[in-house]
Amino acid sequence: MHTGTQLYRLDNPVRDYAWGSRTTIADLQGRPSPTAAPEAEVWIGTHPAAPSRIAGGNDLLKAIEADRAGLLGPAHDRLPFLLKILAVAEPLSIQVHPDADQAHRGFAREEALGIPFDAPTRNYRDDWPKPELVYAVTTFDALCGFRAPEAAARLLRRLDGPRLRRVADILEQGGSEAALGALNEWPVADRPALVAEIGEAAVPGGGPDPAHRAAAMIATHHPQDPGVVASLLFNLITLRPGEALYTAPRTIHAYLRGTAIEIMACSDNVLRGGLTGKHIDQSELTAVTDFTPTRPEVLEPRTLATGEELYVTPAPQFQLTRLRPRPHIGIPAPGPSAILCIEGVLHVTRGDATELLSPGEALFVPYEGAGPLVVEGGGLGFRASVPCGRS
């Protein structure tokens, strides 16, 4: 039964993946650092792998299951988004996420095969697509989508290594799909020599291209992984603080370094293609990936009538707005949504409920509630919600 609570303060799990930072998230949340293990992500939402908890109570997923109509409203059977804080100290894996049809079919296929959810060979842990948006808190480097094959081939030829020239030949003759396949099938014994050509070959005409520098940096972490060379097939994007990047399903990408806020559909479906010790399914990755060359757009926000700043994407599962109350922001129909503070202090009020958020703290705003949501203070935060009219 709905309790009538206007705002739910959340305790959010920290994920300790190897590529994370020992200081970033702890410093943001005001905890001692360095931490014992790298801390990579904070998850704010209801994904079954690590749901947020309502402070002093149940986890948010179970609370929604007990009162779906009150917390989510009539349009949703689950919270469709997952909000994250990312602390990228080392490159993430090269990866692709499925679209809706691929996720549905892949999940059904692995269910029929009886592959356990926690099996390392499981590709589809749910039946949802996974579009995502990343917002740069600091300067943030990412790989996203394929360069034109001829442009990637020029990058490889400038390094002038015999193995890299061979990859360039494959690119020019067969395109990005053929080159990525060749790199993933590169003889294991020859992979260190392949990667070494990134750092050893002289680059004529002055300093190296930023893509070469990025590849050399990746090589310091993965000296035997042909994904280092594959990085030159992709667009290198550097986001300045306040800029954002949308990654559609089927788009190959990898995050390289920096601190960011990420929002995505509530899915954990990942097909990996390199720079990882985790499971790589080359045939499934190829089936899911869109190899069409593209140039991702760097997004700037659009100010709404509410005073929020919206990063526009086509994703039906989420939208992200930046909150910089000067002096206040009023949101007439705010739920269901999540509010996250990353700087200063935010005062959040709805009806007779008020919460004070400090950096790293978050709350959930239910569908049912009295009156608008009012955000005040001199801080910086974000609101994750569902685009109006979408489910």
Image: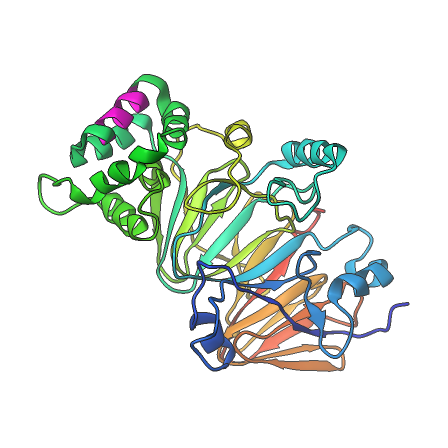
Judged left or right of residue 181, residue 166 is left
Judged left or right of residue 335, residue 325 is left
Judged left or right of residue 136, residue 309 is right
- Could you tell me which residue is drawn at 38 percent across and 37 percent down? 295
Q: Nearer the viewer, residue 84 or 337?
A: 84
Quarter location, residue 165: top left
Q: Residue furthest right?
A: 1
Judged left or right of residue 96, residue 366 is right
Quarter location, residue 60: bottom right
- Could you tell me which residue is drawn at 46 percent across and 58 percent down? 135
- Vertical position of residue 144 compared to residue 50: above or below: above
Q: Is residue 169 magenta?
A: yes
- Could you tell me which residue is drawn at 76 percent across and 32 percent down? 112
Where residue 149 appears, as percent x and y from the top left, is 32, 27
Where residue 302 appears, as percent x and y from the top left, is 49, 56
- Vertical position of residue 299 compared to residue 35: above or below: above
Q: Residue furthest left?
A: 205
Q: Main secondary structure of the magenta part?
A: helix
Q: Residue furthest front?
A: 189
Where residue 108 appears, as percent x and y from the top left, is 73, 34
Q: Is residue 203 visible?
A: yes
Q: Is residue 33 magenta?
A: no
Q: Residue furthest top?
A: 173
What residue span does the magenta drawing correspond to?
164-172
Quadrant placement of the N terminus: bottom right
- Vertical position of residue 307 compared to residue 346: above or below: above
Where residue 332 appears, as percent x and y from the top left, is 69, 65
Q: Is residue 67 visible?
A: no
